[in-house]
Image: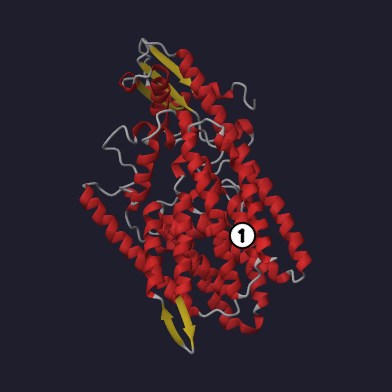
Amino acid sequence: MEKRLDTLGIIGLILVFIVLYYPVWITDYVYTDEAVQLWHYGKTPSFRMFVPQGRYITDKLMFWSFGNIQQIEQLKFIRIFSFLGWLCAIPVWYYVLKAILLREGLPVLLAFVCTLYLVCMPPLSISVMWASCFELFIANTAGLLSGYCLYRAIKISNNRTEVSSRLLWLSVLLGIISMFTYQNGFGCFFIPFIIHILSARRNLRYIWIGIAVYLFVLVIYYILFRYNLKVSGIAASDRTGVHLAPWDKLKFFITRPMRSAFHFTYLFNERNFWGYLVYALFFGCWIVGYWLRHTSKKKELLTVLLVCFGLLALVYIPSLIVKENYASNRTLLAVKMTVFILVAESILFYLRKRMLQKAVLAVMTVLFVYNAFYNVRYLFLRPVRHEYLQLRSFVEKTYNPQVRNYYFIRPREEFLVQHLGITRSWDEFGVPSSFFNWVPEFFIKQVIYERTGHRALADSIVVKHWLGLEEFEASGEKKLPNSVFIDAEQIIKQEVGK
């Protein structure tokens, strides 16, 4: 009976996943970094975008994937690779979560609801729909398995602690793979230990061992990263420089990553007042609820809360030790998952009756799936596809062999928000692809290359760009003969919504 329920649950999760993300099989578009990567990877030998950022595995994957395609319509094959990767990862996440929950004596319903949340969350949506992030299923799943291997390696009995060396080194290996793929994915390492804290069987030795191994992996990774740069003769990206500013980073973590985590699948703009209010409400309710459960053990309660918060910060440590403060959705899968586990476990604790738990689970399922559908279709695919089709059509119609110059007026960041009434979330949802200054040149060259079949000819085209007409007029730039003027906002406005 239990195996049958597991099978039905996984089938249900896979069906939800397919319904949400099948459009990547049939939809053509190019989004931001994809234009740069399609133009350079495998075509410009010296181009290595991710090695300087410490993502050696991702760089190899990018070279293999983008290097084997030539056209924008072929980008769907990379998205399909991510689609299939997550499809394989879903049962792994479900069974790992279930195994931990069973061992800790917690409701196994959490395995289904947490995996469903994984399927619907914005970080996973982005990793499927944006070819530039197709490696996230590897990084996050490897991070989870790394933590799970260590969790299973630890044996504590009669006040004696043993750690299986075989599982320990497997954990380290998986952790290094995760780090060299996408550093924030390694935060999933702490998911088993977060669940352990919630158990009545908790023993903080698990946590201290987990933290020690986590930091050990970070040190080993950093040594290997610097060695790789030295061997490759490449300078590290500015984004990888260590920046120690504890107070500033604490404020950033509390106001940005944690806030987004308590929004669950709903997307607020990072400056939205209501987003802060919702965050304060949910976070406050969880703190109060957890406090009421453990009023008889206040000293232990305070310790557990501090450890929980410390682990949440460690989950996001790759983004907290660098200078850049940018809590984009793609960096948040581990943080959002750990926060959701904490909240979902509290909800099930207070809903003692099995039927009530199932009813709430059903409501959460509907809300998550509906919200994810809206995020995927209306905040990402619809505007991105429309922008791509309109701009591509204009470039193709205006191009002729005499054209040598393009003057591109980039749309404002809030353009789609104002004209479609949608939410913008970082550089991933609700923002025009051509807003970013590195997009116009490679987008135009790629379209011309696909039309003419001559890469050298397309590469000789000169593309100049400005953010808005005001910036162009202030530049004093004069249009040269044999040139094309592109006002992206005016072009994208045409037939909006159709």
Q: Quadrant of residue 338?
A: bottom right
| Left or right for 220, reference 269 | left
Decide: is 402 above or below 441. Answer: above
Decide: is 82 above or below 311. Answer: above
Dot 1 corresponds to which residue?
114
Q: Quadrant of residue 425?
A: top right
Residue type of the residue flagged with mark 1: Cys
Residue 465, given in percent of the width and then of the height, sits at: 40, 26
| Left or right for 90, reference 216 | right
In the rendered image, is residue 479 in sight?
yes
In the rendered image, is residue 423 in sight?
no
Decide: is 278 above or below 410. Answer: below
The foreground one among 365 and 280 is 365
The foreground one among 455 and 482 is 455
Assign the C terminus to one quadrant of the image: top right
User: For the point 55% across and 36% down, which residue is it?
Assistant: 25
| Left or right for 398, reference 202 | left
Q: Quadrant of residue 447?
A: top left
User: For the point 45% across and 29% down, which residue is it?
Assistant: 72
Decide: is 45 above or below 408. Answer: below
Residue 380, given in percent of the width and then of the height, sits at: 57, 38
Residue 272, given in percent of the width and then of the height, sits at: 59, 47
